[in-house]
Image (spheres, rainbow, N blue to C red):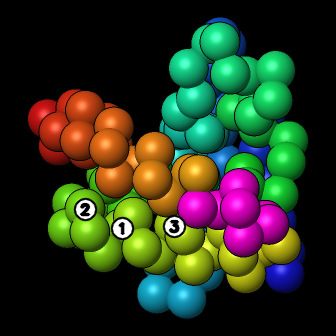
Amino acid sequence: MKEISLRHLTGKWWEVTEDYYYMETFLEKSFKTDGASTPKWIKCAYPSVGRKYTTPSVLHDKWYFLRIPRKIADLRFYKACRKFGVSKETSRIFYIAVIKFGWFSYWKKRK
């Protein structure tokens, strides 16, 4: 599968550099993302960008931005992780993390 193309802006922010389409989701060039929203203390193991989970993480941001119901967005994220070659164990860790802590980003992106 083709990975999403990003360029670093500043701090934690990245920008999509080419239009990207995945299943029913269109990510337009210039969409801004923070990649995987991992806490600072875990970034050494799971950096925000640069791994197999980068594209699923950006898609997850877009799904939250589009206000897709969280349960659906979170399950799509898990499935996308698996499709992009993220191990089952890591995909489960991420899935549990977005279920437990994704509410903050979901409501923040709704404003």
Could you tell me which residue is drawn at 85 percent across and 48 percent down? 51
Measured as percent of width and height from the top left, residue 97 is found at: 46, 45
Say if the magenta span includes residue 88: yes
Q: Amino acid at mark 1?
A: Ala
Say if the magenta span includes residue 23: no
Left or right, 20 with respect to 1, comes to: left
- Spatial distance from mark 2 to mark 1, Cα to Cα? 5 Å
- Mostly what secondary structure, the magenta segment? helix
Q: Which residue is mark 1?
A: 73
Q: Quadrant of the N terminus?
A: bottom right
Neighbours of disc 3 within 10 Å: few (<14), some (14-19), many (20+)? many
Mark identifier at residue 70: 2
Left or right, 3 with respect to 23, comes to: right
Measured as percent of width and height from the top left, residue 13 is found at: 60, 24
Q: Quadrant of residue 30?
A: top right
Measured as percent of width and height from the top left, residue 52 is found at: 83, 57
Q: Amino acid at mark 2?
A: Arg
Of mark 3 and mark 2, the one earlier in the sequence is: 2
User: Eyeballing the image, is 23 above or below 50?
Assistant: below
Measured as percent of width and height from the top left, residue 89 is found at: 71, 62
Mark identifier at residue 77: 3
Task: Check whether the beta carbons of the residues at disc 1 and disc 3 lie within 8 A of each other.
Answer: yes
The range drawn in magenta is 86-92
Task: Check whether the beta carbons of the residues at disc 2 and disc 1 lie within 8 A of each other.
Answer: yes
Judging from the image, what secondary structure is the residue with disc 2 in? helix
